[in-house]
Image: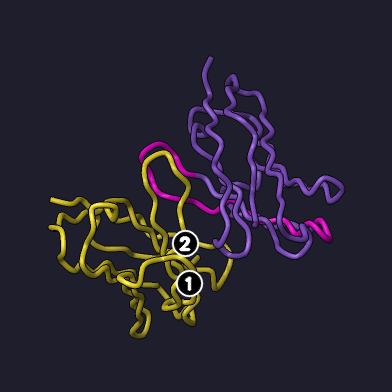
Chain colours: A purple, B yellow
Amino acid sequence: EVQLQQSGPEVGRPGSSVKISCKASGYTFTDYVMNWVKQSPGQGLEWIGWIDPEYGSTDYAEKFKKKATLTADTSSSTAYIQLSSLTSEDTATYFCVCRDGFYWGQGVMVTVSS
Amino acid sequence: DIQMTQSPASLSASLGETVTIECLASEDIYSNLAWYQQKPGKSPQLLIYDASSLQDGVPSRFSGSESGTQYSLEINSLQSEDAATYFCQQHHDYPYTFGAGTKLELK
């Protein structure tokens, strides 16, 4: 059974960074790219970007190019997203998603607060 | 970027009714469309992929269709557990884009 287990909720101060993890199991980690999606409170869904765990290659939506950094550790089958220079606009739930939407993590709530 | 225009934004229907939700793509996405159901506090769950293929375990009262760049999700014989928000997503080209969502309420 494919599972994407994400880390716990995060609180970050304005201007700081947070790093969220997504541990994959039940499949070969390098078989699928990992996508990341943002959902702001009460809002819709935004695609952030993807990483190919096998090669480390990445692609980002334009608005997230300076905000998000995607990495992956094949030894632990874990993908990461780091969000930098946090502002209130970054308060949201962040999901990892693989196989074009077949599998989603449970989401991580990030709250930016001083 | 490909724009996905989803309608209606909200919908109220009775048990047993049939409802249709639509998404219009700004360009041809070659059936690379998925429909999701999301309940409060949960991650989206895949219902339909490739415009009309039913994901394993999803009740057959859910169905997807397409006509040109217009994609539709139909839910037959509404059940109480169908109250949720529904999203479409194109995965033809990056950046992947989503519809704004349709909140379905059961009367």
Kindly identify which residue carries mark 2. B46
As measured in the structure, the alpha-carbon distance from the residue carrying label 2 to the one carrying label 1 is 7 Å
Q: Amino acid at mark 2?
A: Leu
* Residue found 36% across the figure and 67% down from its top: B59
- Badge 2 vs badge 1, beta-carbon distance below 8 Å: yes
Q: Foreground residue, B77 or B6?
A: B77
| Residue A35 location (% of width, % of height) | 63, 55
In the rendered view, would you say A96 is above or below B94? above
Q: Residue at x 22, y 54 (%)?
A: B10
| Viewer-closest of A65 and B9 | B9
Task: Inspect the magenta stretch and tell me whether residue B79 lies in it.
Answer: no
Specify the amino acid type for callout 1. Answer: Tyr
Q: Mark 1 — on which chain does it sit?
A: B
The image shows residue B70 at horizontal and vertical percentages of: 33, 77
Query: Which residues are drawn in magenta?
Result: A39-56
Residue B58: % across, % down? 41, 66
Residue tagged 1 = B49
Label 2 lies in what chain? B
Question: Does B87 appear above or below A8?
Answer: below
Instruction: Please give the name of the residue rendered at 30% of the width and 71% of the height, measured from the top-left corner.
Output: B61
Label 1: element kind = strand
Q: Residue furthest top?
A: A114
Q: Residue furthest bottom?
A: B68
Quick check: A33 left or right of B82? right
Q: Give the residue drawn at x 76%, y 45%.
A: A78
